[in-house]
Amino acid sequence: MTTPPIRKETENRPKLALNATAVVANLAKLEGWTLNGDGPEVVIEKSYSFENYYQTMAFVNAVAFIAHAQDHHPHLLVQFKRCVVRFNTHDVAGLTLRDFDCAARVDALTA
Ligand code: H2B
């Protein structure tokens, strides 16, 4: 099985760590995402609830597809009927627009 290629526009997008003001402004555009940790451990995270394990895993696979296409990989905590998605940009040890862009893409899966 071949995997789809990484999209060129995201592959070449520069990763710039956002300052606190920009983080708050971008967080305000999202529904249900919270800021956790600080310094290099800072993340945005959201918990998604499902009716069963099958639905949870379908979501996880869709997130994996987005992560591959965007070359940006969240930390996932997978449980029976819940998945916690955490984004940060380890390349800059902080948060970037890529984190917020991917968070919005993940949200669109459940819209
Ligand atoms: N995912 C996340 N969450 N943060 C990164 O900094 C990151 C990534 N960097 N996925 C990407 C891969 C980088 O290592 C590759 C080489 O593009």
Image: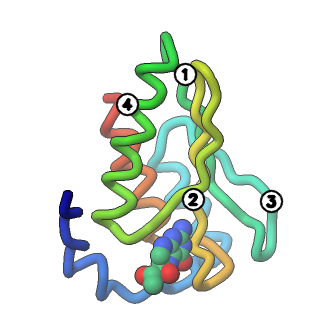
Give the amino acid type for the residue marked by disc 3 in the picture. Answer: Gly
Q: Quadrant of the N terminus?
A: bottom left
Farthest-out residue, front = 1
Which label number is shown at residue 37?
A: 3
**Which is more toward the observer, 72 or 108?**
72
Identify the secondary structure beneath mark 4: helix
Q: Which mark is residue 87?
A: 2
Tell me if mark 2 has few (under 14), some (14-19) or many (20+) residues whose alpha carbon lies within 10 angstroms of its own.
Answer: many
The answer to whether the residues at label 1 and label 3 have Cβ atoms under 8 Å apart is: no
Q: Quadrant of residue 13?
A: bottom left
Q: Residue at x 45, y 49 (%)?
A: 29
Task: Compute the Cα span from label 4 to label 3.
Answer: 28 Å
Please tell me whether mark 2 or mark 4 is closer to you in this view: 4
In the rendered image, which residue does mark 4 sit on?
58
Compare marks 4 and 3 and give the one earlier in the sequence: 3
Question: Closer to the camera: disc 3 or disc 2?
Answer: 2
- Name the amino acid type tagged 4: Ala
Q: Which residue is mark 1?
A: 49
**Gap in Å between the C-alphas at discs 2 and 4?**
19 Å
